[in-house]
Image (cartoon, helix red, strand yellow):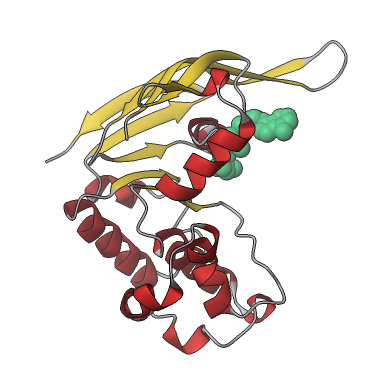
Amino acid sequence: MQIRLINITKRYRVTQEKTLVSLKRVNLDINEGDYLSLVGPSGSGKTTLLHTALGLLRPTEGDVFWNKLSLSHASDAEISAMRRRYFGIVFQEAQFVDDLTVADNIVLPLLINGIAVNSKRVYFKTLCEKLRIDHLVHLYPYQLSGGERKKVSIARALIHSPEILVADEPTANLDEKSAQEIYHIFQNLNQLGLTIVVATHDVRFREYCREAYSILDGEITGFSQFR
Ligand SMILES: Nc1ncnc2c1ncn2[C@@H]1O[C@H](COP(=O)(O)OP(=O)(O)OP(=O)(O)O)[C@@H](O)[C@H]1O
Ligand SMILES: [Mg+2]
């Protein structure tokens, strides 16, 4: 799937007379097989941009296209059905179903997409080993550390083999070794054809991704291409 952000402006009304512009006329194309990172300081608009691209947030101006589908003309139901199927999402703050085990949380996207859990048993095991969370699967979400929550949410985002992985600060709260593991996992998945979009403060992603965009005050201010 190709994602196109066309002239996206997002304004928030803060008070009666004051608005805050969180994205300013942003244009961005995300093509199949891309691996791009959005790097910018806190408050620069990274999460707003990702949520807009995911159809979770409606822009004030501009439009988002998923292939030929204009999100401004699509219903919320249509958008969420497609989002569940095509995207894997790592939110900045992972949300889990608290009374399900970690394993059951990870396989939830399979149930939602009508994919037999059994058919993914081997992939589940591989993902948990690669992310080093296999010892955590019988725990409950409240028993996890911040870094462990991040890794579990990465497993959950990947289990249904999405076309596109959108990850908001995937290495926040992670120690150096775990962060390295994430870079390598993402790089391998991209080489296997997964499209990846990462929003991060972590400049080390520049070493692994193919294209990096700098974002500042809601505007894309720079672009570099690697490899
Ligand atoms: N619901 C909202 N209402 C009002 N302002 C908002 C809302 N969501 C975001 N903003 C503002 O939009 C700007 C961009 O926020 P955003 O969360 O996209 O930044 P970010 O780059 O993801 O930051 P961080 O690195 O801290 O996650 C910020 O100034 C923020 O305060
Ligand atoms: Mg953010």
Position of residue 203 in the picture relative to residue 12 (left or right): left
How many numbered markers are drawn?
0
Q: Is residue 161 left or right of residue 199?
A: left
Residue 11 is left or right of residue 108, and the answer is right
Left or right relative to 101: residue 152: left
Q: Residue furthest right?
A: 16
Does any portion of residue 131 appear in the rendered image? Answer: no
> As rendered, which of 213 and 87 lies closer to the eye?
87
- How far from the left and from the top, in percent, is residue 145? 59, 75
Quadrant in which residue 16 is drawn: top right
Identify the image quadrant of residue 74: top right
- Decide if residue 210 is in sight here: yes
The residue under the point 24% across, 30% down is 224
* Quarter holding residue 123: bottom left
The residue positioned 40% from the left and 78% from the top of the image is 118
Q: Furthest-left residue in view?
A: 227
Of the 4 image quadrants, the one containing the C terminus is: top left
| In the rendered image, the vertical position of residue 103 relative to residue 88, given as above or below | below
Q: Position of residue 167 (x, y in %)?
A: 44, 50
Residue found at x 21% / y 50%: 193
The quadrant where ligand 2 appears is top right
Tell me: residue 190, above or below residue 38.
below
The residue that appears at 53% across and 79% down in the rendered structure is: 103
Work out whether residue 149 or residue 139 is closer to the camera in this orientation and state it.
139
Q: Nearer the viewer, residue 56 or 13?
A: 56
The location of residue 173, given as percent across then percent down, is 52, 64
Height in image: 10 above or below 51? above
